[in-house]
Image: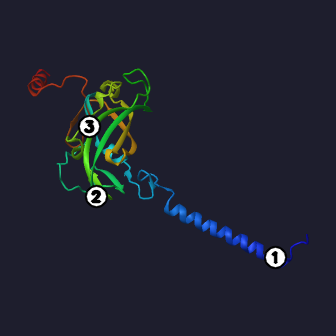
Amino acid sequence: MAPASTDELSETAQTTESATQNDSILTRRTFGKGAAILAGVSGAGLGFVWFGSSPALAVDDPEEWIANSAEITTHDGSVDAVTFGDPDEIADGDELEDDDNRLIVEWSGFNADTRDATFNVSLAGTDGGDGGTWAGGDETTEQEELATGSETLEGTNGSAAFTWLDVFGESQPVDVAEHTEIELSDFEEDDDGATRVRELEVEIEVVVPDEDELTATQTATATITVTNQEATIEVGGQGTFEIESDEAVEDEEEAEVTDEEK
């Protein structure tokens, strides 16, 4: 067979290149219309998978929601309670301000105008912070669900902001001491002037049962810090100084008697 001429080679190359370009265009169009597209926001929110017109659900980054919701009740280094919820007790139905605690949920492609969503909060003790064993005997614990609630998502597409009270019906729904492997003593600090730091991993799960159990999950870290401050007395005047209150302070009558004896 005679070798192909230069013109024939050029024509073949152009045909091949054209076919390749068409395949590339077809691939991109097919991907754009029918294939799975992964959409995510790094750091700021939870990525979700979008399958054409299939429903999608996302929970915004809950780090701030969790961090701002931790409440510690303590006295002299002992801990009476560790809870999560609305620290400022936002009233149900109140219009939320930008600095209010809120969890933002986004959804799209729902098959009905209203869908019920279930919210679950679970937590586990980690080996972060000062570390050490938890009451269960290990340096980490299992995740345990401590609160569940529900809300209605309105519209086939949309987003909504919820408070703890909105979802769970109470301002402080999560009591850490209800975890079977965690006790309040795990957070306590007995030594004056010392601080104890423990770390919890909190998981937020939102499930829409009527959309084939569509689920979005986010995990946040909560650092619990307890400081046992030394008892002090501040005396005002020309200057301010502190007296360590290791001994009982005399009352005024005792002080006068002491001065007369002198």
Residue type at mark 1: give it: Glu
Q: Is residue 163 visible?
A: no
Q: Is residue 134 left or right of residue 151?
A: right
- Disc 1 to disc 2: CB gap under 8 Å: no
Q: Is residue 26 visible?
A: yes
Residue type at mark 3: give it: Phe
Q: Is residue 50 above or below residue 11?
A: above
Residue type at mark 2: give it: Gly
Q: Quadrant of residue 50?
A: bottom left
Residue linked to disc 3:
241
Q: Which SS class for mark 1?
A: helix
Location of the C terminus by quadrant is top left
**Label 1 or label 2, whichever comes before in sequence order:** 1
Q: CA distance from mark 1 to mark 3?
A: 99 Å
Q: Residue furthest left?
A: 253
Q: Which SS class for mark 2?
A: loop
Residue linked to disc 1:
8
Q: Which SS class for mark 3?
A: strand
Mark number displayed over residue 259: none
**Label 1 or label 3, whichever comes before in sequence order:** 1
Q: Quadrant of residue 83?
A: top left
Q: Is residue 116 left or right of residue 23?
A: left
Between residue 69 and residue 57, name the one nearer to us.
57
Location of the N terminus by quadrant is bottom right
Mark number displayed over residue 155: 2
Horizontal and vertical percent for residue 144?
35, 31
Kindly report which numbered mark, 2 or 3, lies closer to the viewer in this rendering: 2
**Label 2 or label 3, whichever comes before in sequence order:** 2
Residue at 38%, 51% (x, y): give it.
58
Q: CA distance from mark 2 to mark 3?
A: 62 Å
Kindly report which numbered mark, 1 or 3, lies closer to the viewer in this rendering: 1
